[in-house]
Amino acid sequence: MSHEKLINLLNQYGTISEIEKLNIEKYFISAKIKKKQVLIEKYLPCNKLFFINNGLLRAYYINDKGKEITRMFAWEGRFLTNISSFKMHSENSETIECIKNADILYINRNDFEVLIKSSHNIKNIYTNILEEYTALHIKRFEVLNTFNLEKKLLHLKNDFPNLTNELNDNLLASFLGISRIHFVNNKHLLYK
């Protein structure tokens, strides 16, 4: 069943009832996504929340110097959206694309609101997951803005070990906010 991983994950935060399970299966739509497929275009509202059953997605933007910056990757058992655009129904500053063929579930903003309002338990689970993702993003902000290169690479190695084997040097450098050349010249630090 395509919703099993999602329901198992949610059960880690609070027991999902049969009615809640049926609503999750009703509102989360299953899709197969191909590598390089764009799911959300820059400048359009990010009106979907994605859950990855398998595969790999990323959210990225292009800075004012034309450099590609990866905000976040999402792999099996993780969520991805632009939470600001998703919540506010506003313009989105980034692109969400598939990096590795993926089986995903997604829910649009309107159905998400219906689902959240249908159950206090689901709302509490969402709050807990949102708090975890916020903590993750705060740590990434600190790493990108205050850590030296060696500490950035250590962060990548310790907090995102699966990415080092899955991604090419361009994507890893983009995730660390450094140039590909700088990454390649110091990549050996990952294996210290």
Image (cartoon, helix red, strand yellow):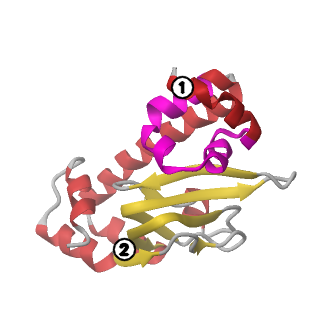
Query: Which residue, given by chain and number where applicable, does mark 1 sit on?
Result: 154
The residue lying at 43 percent from left, 48 percent from top is 130
Please check the rendered image and state whether residue 154 is part of the magenta-colored stretch, yes or no: yes
Numbered circle sitting on residue 114: 2
Q: Residue furthest left?
A: 18
**x, y percent for residue 158:** 45, 29
Q: Main secondary structure of the magenta part?
A: helix
Left or right position of 163 against 65: left
Amino acid bearing label 1: Leu
Residue 103 location in percent, x, y? 37, 70
* C-alpha span from label 2 to label 1: 41 Å
In screen coordinates, is 48 left or right of 112?
A: right
Question: SS at mark 2?
Answer: helix
Which quadrant of the rendered structure holds the N terminus? bottom left
Q: Which residues are magenta?
A: 151-180
Residue 31 lies in quadrant: bottom left
Question: Residue 24 or 159: which is nearer the viewer?
Answer: 159
